[in-house]
């Protein structure tokens, strides 16, 4: 029977797989193919991405005993690319004797390095022979050709291209999200708060098909800095951004600092080739720029008014979200969680302090022998489409 309480729903990647959105492991393979096809043959970006994936797979096989064919989480790959782009500024850099030779090799295959060399070679030769300005310029020229001046340009361009290709990979159609109808229809009477870690438009499409208002609140936040919600319909918190949110550079003139702002895709011309406003990758999910920190604060606010959390397709691998769930459970012992996950393990044998699912399993479900208490965690090992009719 449907729970009579008004829950808050938290969606992860598993909630969108039935709409055709690839898993995080499938997405790596598809992104590699798309980056290869969208960049010049033999280009540095595609080669750098192949290098990153191969290195991570080799590391896993050597250190963890995993099969090199078991797949790579796309967010882990993206995090590696971002780290390589920023490697010269990382706090740990002074303690790194040398990077893998290929790291710099792919990062110096850009036209900018070659152009710098060609443009300044004659100037360096004609400069004073004393080791002054000419000597410094010659040093820069050598760096440009040997790779020691690699500044992360290739990896930054690669990260940009991966984000652009991601938009196409997570695109959904109204017909493909039919299975989400029970979730949308649950908002027909009153309101329903949904927080999603996904970037796709599946909830918006399901709400439109059901004739239910759906607000992300971001347009109001952009104008006022507050989250104002309509009385009825779906309150949709897109915690990591959306493929129809676009970054745009703002130049407001004298007396104002330049900055980036978020616009809706329909507000900009040619928005389909502009960078989507997403928090993608394992790093940087607590980004101060844009609405992302404020979204997490609003999630806590909305959760405070719910006594039941329904989690669908979330793997509990985002620490910042897990911390909010942990505080929410601690504040009121009557609060309960339902998890929809066909892959939830039958038992956990690892360290409950390091695996959040194991911690929940250990502390929220009564043990077979020991102190009894009402279970606060219910596990439904079904696909999203099978579980939703029973939940709503």
Image (cartoon, helix red, strand yellow):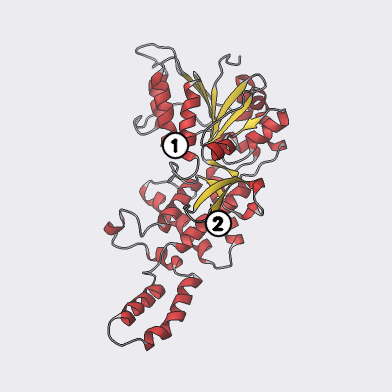
Which quadrant is the N terminus positioned in? top right
Q: Which numbered tag is attached to residue 355?
A: none
- Does residue 376 lie above or below 287 as drawn? above
Q: Give the percent coordinates (x, y) of residue 161.
A: 55, 56
Residue farthest to the front?
255
Q: Nearer the viewer, residue 223 or 160?
A: 223
The reply to whether residue 73 is in sight is no
Bin the neighbour count of mark 2 within 10 Å (Cα to Cα): few under 14, some 14-19, many 20 and up.
many
Which quadrant is the C terminus positioned in? top right
For mark 2, give the secondary structure.
Answer: helix
Q: Which numbered tag is attached to residue 317?
A: 1
Bin the neighbour count of mark 1 within 10 Å (Cα to Cα): few under 14, some 14-19, many 20 and up.
few
- Does residue 53 lie above or below 228 as drawn? below
| Residue displayed at 57% across by 37% down | 218
- Does residue 39 lie above or below 75 as drawn? below
Which quadrant of the structure image shows residue 212?
top right
Residue at the spot of label 2: 161
Q: Give the percent coordinates (x, y) of residue 282.
A: 44, 44
Q: Earlier in the sequence, mark 2 or mark 1?
A: 2
The reply to whether residue 304 is in sight is yes
Q: Give the percent coordinates (x, y) of residue 313.
A: 54, 32
Q: Is residue 182 left or right of residue 124?
A: right
- Does residue 187 lie above or below 208 as drawn? above
Q: Give the percent coordinates (x, y) of residue 257.
A: 46, 53
Find the distance from the CA under tag 2 to the CA under tag 1.
25 Å
């Amino acid at each position: 029977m449907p729970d009579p309480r008004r829950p808050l729903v938290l969606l992860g990647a598993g909630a969108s797989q039935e709409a055709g959105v690839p898993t995080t492991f499938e997405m790596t393979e598809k992104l590699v193919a798309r980056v290869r096809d969208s960049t010049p043959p033999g280009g540095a970006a595609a080669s750098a991405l192949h290098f990153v994936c191969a290195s991570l797979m080799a590391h896993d096989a050597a250190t963890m005993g995993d099969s090199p064919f078991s797949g790579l989480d796309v967010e882990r790959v993206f995090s590696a690319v971002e780290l390589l782009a920023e490697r010269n500024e990382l706090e740990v850099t002074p303690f790194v004797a040398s990077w893998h030779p290929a790291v710099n090799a792919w990062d110096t295959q850009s036209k900018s390095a070659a152009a710098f060399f060609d443009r300044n070679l004659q100037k360096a030769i004609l400069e004073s022979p004393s080791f002054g300005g000419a000597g410094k310029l010659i040093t820069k020229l050598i760096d440009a050709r040997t790779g020691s001046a690699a500044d992360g340009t290739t990896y930054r361009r690669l990260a940009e291209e991966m984000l652009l290709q991601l938009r196409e990979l997570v695109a959904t159609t109204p017909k493909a999200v039919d299975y989400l109808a029970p979730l949308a229809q649950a908002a027909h009477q009153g309101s329903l708060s949904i927080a999603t870690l996904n970037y796709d438009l599946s909830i918006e499409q399901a709400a439109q098909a059901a004739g239910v208002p759906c607000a992300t609140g971001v347009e109001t936040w952009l104008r006022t800095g507050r989250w104002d919600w309509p009385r009825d319909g779906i309150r949709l918190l897109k915690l990591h951004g959306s493929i129809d949110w676009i970054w745009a550079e703002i130049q407001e003139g004298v007396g104002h600092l330049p900055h980036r702002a978020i616009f809706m895709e329909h507000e900009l011309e040619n928005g389909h080739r502009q960078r989507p406003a997403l928090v993608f990758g394992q790093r940087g999910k607590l980004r101060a720029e844009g609405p992302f920190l404020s979204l997490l604060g609003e999630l806590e606010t909305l959760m405070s008014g719910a006594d039941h959390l329904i989690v669908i397709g979330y793997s509990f691998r985002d620490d910042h979200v897990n911390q909010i769930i942990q505080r929410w459970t601690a504040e009121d012992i009557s609060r309960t969680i339902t998890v929809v996950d066909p892959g939830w393990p039958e038992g956990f044998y690892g360290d409950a302090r390091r695996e959040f699912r194991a911690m929940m399993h250990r502390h929220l479900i009564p043990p077979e022998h020991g102190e009894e208490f009402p279970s606060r965690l219910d596990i439904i090992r079904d696909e999203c489409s099978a579980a939703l009719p029973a939940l709503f």
